[in-house]
Image: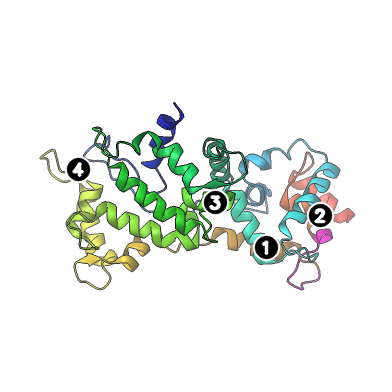
Amino acid sequence: MMKMEVRPLLMCFALCVVYATSKPTEKKERVHHDATLSSKEHNDGTNFDYDHDAFLGEEEAKTFDDLTPEESQNRLGKIVDKIDADEDGFVTEAELKAWIKKAQKKYIYDNVERQWKDFDINNDGMISWDEYKNVTYGSYLDDPEPDDGYNYKQMMARDERRFKLADQNGDQIADKEEFTAFLHPEEYEHMKDIVVLETIEDIDKNGDGFIDLEEYIGDMYNHEDEMDEPEWVSTEREQFSEFRDKNKDGKMDKEETMDWILPADYDHAEAEAKHLVYESDTNKDGLLTKEEIINKYDLFVGSQATDFGEALVRHDEF
């Protein structure tokens, strides 16, 4: 049944990982880092492969490899229209950064698309809390404490709290963006507090609203087998005392937990947006026109003819 397929999603949301099968010596990871924009080296002196992956996402970038330069330029022009969110005819650095971030999160949007049809029961293009609740918990509403080890009443309350936060207009109905925020809260600024709260609730065994050292280690390391602690556990104890517990009160509060699981990493998308603007902004006004972007199409998207030598020839022709 669909309910049985959907139920495991609850236990695997975002940072809430099921650790039951972990070996005692394996480190359990809760920290969310932004991934790099491409697996390729960023060296424009050799090629623009990194920029293509950053601008389009690695899978989408491959689709341009078989296009003629004219086809690539035409397709890029349509993309520029989408990037220009306020439709003023210019692409700003902020708009470019937002586009890059969206391109890099395509796998998340694909995941949401796969699940969407399971929850949008009435096919109205929206998912209400009742739809989500009935699909996910329907068979348990009559028996909220089944004999399988899960507290579905508690899980449903937690899901409803997150759904309400993702539902920014408060109508108890989620559009695609709101449902994406519900399923992947770590990707949204306004959802980060709920990620922190859920993490603390998962780890805080004594219910004081904080994470102390033993709770911190206990979440990462299974003590069941009486063996010597692996070296990484000792390192984590030091990390907790020296870096995690910033105010040295022996425990992590919400702010310290956020710094731990959602660190302020280097912003790859912002750096790439600045780079693309710098390389393409011919009149140096800080804004990109469609013409400026298409003139540098080999930097943004590439084509059959975008090996570096041919790209240099085309620039001479421009």
**Disc 1 to disc 3, how far (Cα)?**
24 Å
Outermost residue toward the left?
226
Residue corresponding to mark 3: 174
Outermost residue toward the front?
142
Label number found at residue 294: 2
Question: Which comes sooner in the sequence, label 4 or label 2?
Answer: 4
Residue type at the position of mark 1: Glu
Question: Which comes sooner in the sequence, label 3 or label 4?
Answer: 3
Q: Residue at x 54, y 42 (%)?
A: 112
> In the rendering, at what x and y percent does residue 301 appear?
73, 48
Please tell me whether mark 1 sits on a helix, a strand or a loop.
helix
Residue 24 in which image quadrant? top left
> In the rendering, at what x and y percent does residue 185 appear?
46, 54
In-image side of 195 versus 168 (left or right)? left
For the N terminus, give its image quadrant.
Answer: top left
CB atoms of marks 1 and 3 within 8 Å: no
Label number found at residue 222: 4
Residue 150 in which image quadrant? top left
Question: Which comes sooner in the sequence, label 3 or label 2?
Answer: 3
**Disc 3 to disc 4, how far (Cα)?**
38 Å
Q: Marks 2 and 1: which is nearer the front?
A: 1
**Disc 2 to disc 1, how far (Cα)?**
16 Å
For the C terminus, give its image quadrant.
Answer: bottom right
Q: Is residue 258 visible?
A: yes
Q: Residue at x 25, y 48 (%)?
A: 220
**Disc 4 to disc 1, how far (Cα)?**
45 Å
Q: Name the main secondary structure of what is drawn in magenta.
A: loop
Residue type at the position of mark 3: Ala
